[in-house]
Image (cartoon, rainbow, N blue to C red):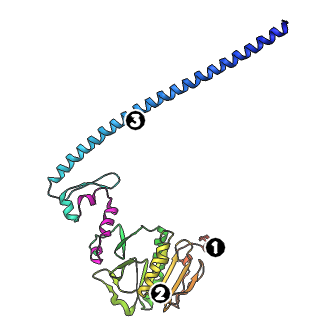
């Protein structure tokens, strides 16, 4: 056999040995990785078991302390409740249940808002709503249900104050009646709304009840400052409710764009009689001699006001 042939065979055998060696290394590496994964799984299971045991011990301690505290407050004749860091009721005694006219299960795990919401969900009528303590939180009453009133933005309040002051000056100067900000208006026994501004003509002053601090009946003008959160309610729900109640005039003021819309009640429904952009003079049909530039009134240049979409 020639030297070249021997060298060729040797090279082939060496290459085969290298491939075999690499294959063995791969198998060993895979086996090692499988062992590591198995060890990790065992370790995780062990840790999970330890965490489960510690959690059970913690729950047992909390239950023991809760039972002790519950037994303690039950010995006291005064209404007592306990709240957690998330403001939810965690405990109360029987005296507190009797004061609230609610069972333990209806009180615990609710926060103040949720607790009141549950009570109002079971309201039978206006008398139950009127028996609620004064807010905050504040609510409207609509069809036997509570409607939460979110706290308004400072800009929203500034619009109410400046627009209300301008209207009050004009109405008082001309002895036309009275205007109030954020007063309860009982449209019916099923609806009590809180309007941003409300106007009663002089001939309808008897609809304001001093004793109850609200208007009972239909106002002559309702004004709502529309925010993104209230747009649907102001433009649809209240719009239809005021129409049904026979409110003669309804103004919608966009709190962002300062666009003012004036609606007049006609036999077929509300008719839009004016729509004024920021920086333009608003001359309401209800008060023909009044002129309002809302952007100037609240101290904002018209060019800085957000433009309505699509315009």
From the image, give the main secondary structure of the stretch colored magenta: helix
At 42% across and 82% down in the image, what residue appears? 198
Distance between mark 2 and mark 1 Cα atoms: 27 Å
**Front-most of 264 and 23?**
23
Distance between mark 2 and mark 3 Cα atoms: 67 Å
- Compare marks 2 and 1 and give the one earlier in the sequence: 2
**Which of the 4 image quadrants contains residue 125?**
bottom left
Instruction: Say what secondary structure mark 1 lies in.
Output: loop
- Compare marks 2 and 3 and give the one earlier in the sequence: 3
Residue denoted by label 1: 310
Image-based side of 67 in relation to 151, left or right: left
- Counting from the top left corner in percent of width and height, residue 60 is at 27, 41
Q: Is residue 212 magenta?
A: no
- Counting from the top left corner in percent of width and height, residue 244 is at 43, 85
- Compare marks 1 and 3 and give the one earlier in the sequence: 3
Which circle, 2 or 3, is nearer the viewer? 3
Instruction: Say what secondary structure mark 3 lies in.
Output: helix
- Counting from the top left corner in percent of width and height, residue 75 is at 14, 52
Quadrant in which the N terminus is drawn: top right
Residue denoted by label 2: 249
Residue denoted by label 3: 48
Q: Indicate whether 288 appears above or below 99.
A: below
Which residues are drawn in magenta? 102-129
**Front-most of 182 and 264?**
264
Q: Residues within 10 Å of mark 1 (few under 14, many from 20)?
A: few
Which circle, 1 or 3, is nearer the viewer? 3
């Amino acid at each position: 056999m020639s030297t070249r042939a021997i060298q060729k065979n040797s090279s082939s055998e060496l290459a085969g040995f290298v491939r075999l060696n690499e294959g063995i290394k791969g198998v060993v590496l895979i086996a090692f990785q499988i062992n590591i994964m198995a060890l990790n799984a065992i370790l995780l299971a062990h840790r999970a078991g330890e965490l489960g045991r510690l959690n059970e011990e913690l729950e047992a301690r909390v239950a023991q302390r809760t039972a002790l505290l519950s037994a303690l407050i039950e010995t006291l004749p005064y209404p007592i409740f306990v709240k957690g860091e998330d403001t939810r009721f965690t405990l109360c005694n029987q005296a507190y249940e009797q004061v609230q006219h609610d069972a333990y299960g209806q009180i615990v795990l609710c926060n103040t808002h949720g607790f009141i919401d549950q009570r109002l969900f079971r309201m039978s009528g206006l008398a139950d709503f009127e028996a609620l303590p004064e807010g905050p939180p504040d609510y409207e009453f609509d069809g036997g249900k509570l409607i939460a009133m979110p706290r308004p933005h400072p800009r929203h309040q500034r619009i109410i104050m400046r627009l209300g002051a301008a209207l009050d000056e004009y109405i008082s100067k001309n002895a036309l009646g009275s205007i109030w900000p954020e007063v309860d208006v009982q449209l019916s026994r099923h609806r009590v709304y809180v309007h941003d501004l409300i106007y009663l003509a002089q001939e309808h002053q008897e609809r304001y009840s001093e004793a109850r601090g609200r208007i009972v009946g239909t106002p002559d003008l309702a004004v709502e400052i529309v925010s993104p959160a209230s747009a649907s309610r102001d433009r649809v729900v209240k719009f239809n409710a005021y129409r049904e109640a026979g409110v003669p005039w309804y103004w919608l003021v966009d709190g962002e764009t300062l666009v003012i819309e004036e609606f007049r009640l006609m036999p077929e429904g509300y008719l839009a009689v004016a729509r004024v952009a920021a920086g333009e003079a608003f001359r309401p049909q209800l008060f023909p001699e009044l002129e309002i530039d809302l952007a100037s009134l609240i101290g904002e240049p018209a060019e800085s006001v957000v433009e309505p979409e699509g315009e």
